[in-house]
Structures are given as C-alpha cells and as structure tokens.
C-alpha cells in the first residue's frame, strides 16, 4: 500500500496518507470531495493515464485508507498535507483538480504555498469561494443548514449519508441517475472515514472563506459545475468564484448534479484533458456541445 508521511499527531505518531499513482507525463493530482475518498475518482483514474498523463489521487487525512487523527481538519493543515504529497513525490508542472471540498484545498494551497509546482488549477463542483451566509456574504447559505448536517451525522451517520448521496448524484433529478449499487458503493467509501473527520470537515468546508485565496491564483484556471447541483448550488459557488480569479473559465454542465465526476464522467474527462493538453483527445470533440460558457469580459477560455 502506498503511504507517505504528512505530519505527526498530538501523541507524536506519524500521520500518513494513502495514495495511488498511475501513468507517465505531466501530473494531474485529484483531490476528492466530502465525505468520500480517492476511490471516488474511479472513472478519472481509469481514463486520464491513457492520455499521456501521470495521475495521482490521495485519501484526505481521516478518510479512506489514510491515518485518522483527532485534529488537523482545517484548511491550512489540509493544504500542508497537499504540499507534502507534491513535495514527497517531487511533482512538477502539476494540474490540481479539486472536487467539492477538495476545491478548498486547491484554493488554500495556491495562496498558502504560492502555487509552488502548479501549472493549472481545476475546480469541479467546488465549495469555493464562501458558502456561509454572513454580513459580508449575504447570498450564502444559512448556518442552520450546516448545523443540521452535523446534528444528523451524530444521530445516525449511515442513514444520513445514504440519503445525502441521493441528492449528491441527483436521483430523481438527472435523466440518467446512477444505480443503487453505485449509491451503496459511495456509502461504503464514506463509512471508511472517521466520525470525527466527517463532522470536522463539515465545519471546514462550510465556514472557510476562500475569497482572498482565489484572488492569488495566477495560473490558468477552469471551474466546472452542474446547473442542477443541489449540494453546492452553482449560484453560491462557481458563478461567484470565477469572478475572483483573473482570466478563469467557467463551464456549466446543464442538468448535472453535484457528483458529475460520475454522472458526466466522459464529459469531465474530456474537459480536463483539453484544458491540460492531453494526448489522443478525439478530434471531433465539440466544446460547445458539452458545456455552457458564461460571457464575462474578465474571463476567457484557456484553450
């Protein structure tokens, strides 16, 4: 099993993250969403290395097969864990791809570590720039919504997550819902996380303000989001985030839910490869057929 050290816990024990590393070429690092693990990138891990890319994905601390310490679920620490992955594997010319909660890690890494080693950034269904409703973020989500999530996790974590994933993947909303077997698989992945990490990360992704982090990004940046995302609504996230990153591009997947890395896996894979310049992308690929681009004089296509 591939493990690398990212720090020590309060008792001085090593904290290790589990990772997978496939293919050769400029690296794409995949950072998973809450409450899953790197295994949730199954359809990207199976496809992207076929196109001249090295693809690395790791389990966030507290999730999957990584160590499960009591502390360290704030974004400064999580960004430092990402840095440890890039440094230990000596990755250069990296494309960071952050899904949902993972988008926060991308944003915080870019500001906290000055974008070291990074060539491109991609945010997929990401929680950026700031979800919580506050006086200076009046269009955010009421804190009571996130408090209810934490309360229900404490009451019956398996039952809450089983229901959560139906919304996550747009069951009853999208035209091609995922199977019950896939929902069960997601629940199994989520239950590998520690209860502490699952709850602590809700506070992290719901209460962290990434607006200043995004403003520091200088590399080509792509935001991808589903128009039917009910978990992290488009209007609270990507539509706001793209305004904060110079020359960023927003691609809206019409009718897609939060978990579009599964429901629109082929489309997402193509967009990632086109953005980073992967090999063997179909010549007849029509960007306009796959995404809606928002007109904004501050934003342009990076390819």
Image (cartoon, rainbow, N blue to C red):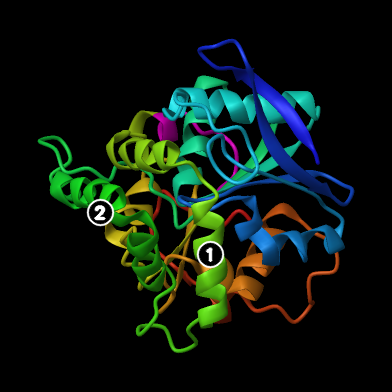
> What residue do we see at 38% from left, 44% from top?
128
Q: Nearer the viewer, mark 2 or mark 1?
A: 2
Tell me which residue sits at (53%, 64%) in the image. 186
Height in image: 213 above or below 13? below
**Residue found at the far bottom of this picture:** 175
Circle 2 residues within 10 Å: few <14, some 14–19, many ≥20: some
Q: Position of residue 155 (x, y in %)?
A: 26, 52
Looking at the rendered structure, the secondary structure element under dot 2 is: helix
Q: Which residues are magenta?
A: 213-222
The CA distance from mark 2 to mark 1 is 18 Å
**Of pointers 2 and 1, the one earlier in the residue sequence:** 2
Q: Are marks 2 and 1 in contact (CB under 8 Å)?
A: no
Judged from the image, the secondary structure of the residue bearing numbered disc 1 is: helix
Q: Residue at x 45, y 46 (%)?
A: 101
Q: Nearer the viewer, residue 33 or 270?
A: 33
Q: On the image, numbered disc 1 is attached to which residue?
A: 186
Residue 85 lies left or right of residue 21; in this view the side is left
Whole-percent x and y of residue 78? 52, 29
> Nearest the camera: 170 or 283?
170
Residue 264 vs residue 218, the one in the foreground:
264
Q: In the displayed structure, does residue 282 sit left or right of residue 98? A: right
Q: Which quadrant of the rendered structure holds the C terminus?
A: bottom right
Q: Does 69 appear in magenta?
A: no
Q: Is residue 195 visible?
A: yes
Number of marks present in the image shown: 2
> In the image, which disc is placed on residue 69?
none
Residue 45 at what x, y percent from top left? Answer: 74, 59
Can you give x and y, in whole percent of width and height, for residue 260 in the image? 51, 69
Mark linked to residue 152: 2
Q: Is residue 217 magenta?
A: yes
């Amino acid at each position: 099993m591939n493990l690398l050290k990212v720090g020590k816990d309060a008792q001085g024990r090593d904290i290790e993250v589990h990772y997978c590393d496939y293919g050769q070429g400029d690296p794409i690092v995949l950072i998973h969403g809450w409450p899953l693990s790197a295994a949730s990138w199954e359809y990207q891990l199976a496809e992207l290395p076929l196109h001249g890319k090295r693809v690395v994905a790791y389990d966030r601390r507290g999730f999957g097969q990584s160590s499960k310490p009591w502390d360290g679920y704030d974004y400064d620490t999580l960004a430092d864990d990402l840095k440890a992955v890039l440094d230990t594997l000596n990755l250069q010319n990296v494309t960071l791809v952050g899904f949902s909660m993972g988008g926060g890690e991308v944003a915080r890494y870019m500001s906290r570590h000055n974008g070291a080693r990074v060539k491109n950034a991609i945010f997929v269904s990401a929680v950026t720039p700031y979800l919580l409703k506050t006086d200076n973020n009046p269009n955010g989500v009421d804190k009571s919504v996130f408090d209810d999530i934490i309360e229900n996790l404490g009451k019956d974590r398996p039952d809450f997550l089983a229901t959560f994933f139906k919304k996550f993947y747009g069951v009853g909303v999208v035209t091609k819902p995922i199977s019950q077997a896939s929902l069960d698989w997601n629940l199994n992945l989520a239950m590998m996380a520690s209860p502490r990490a699952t709850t602590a990360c809700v506070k992290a992704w719901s209460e962290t303000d990434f607006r200043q982090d995004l403003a520091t990004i200088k590399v080509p940046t792509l935001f991808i989001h589903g128009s039917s995302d009910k978990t992290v609504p488009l209007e609270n996230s990507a539509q706001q985030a793209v305004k904060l990153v110079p020359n960023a591009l927003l691609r809206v997947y019409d009718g897609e839910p939060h978990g579009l890395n599964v429901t629109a896996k082929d489309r997402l894979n193509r967009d990632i490869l086109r953005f980073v310049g992967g090999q063997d992308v179909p010549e007849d690929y029509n960007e306009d057929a796959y995404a809606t681009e928002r007109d904004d004089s501050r934003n342009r296509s990076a390819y």
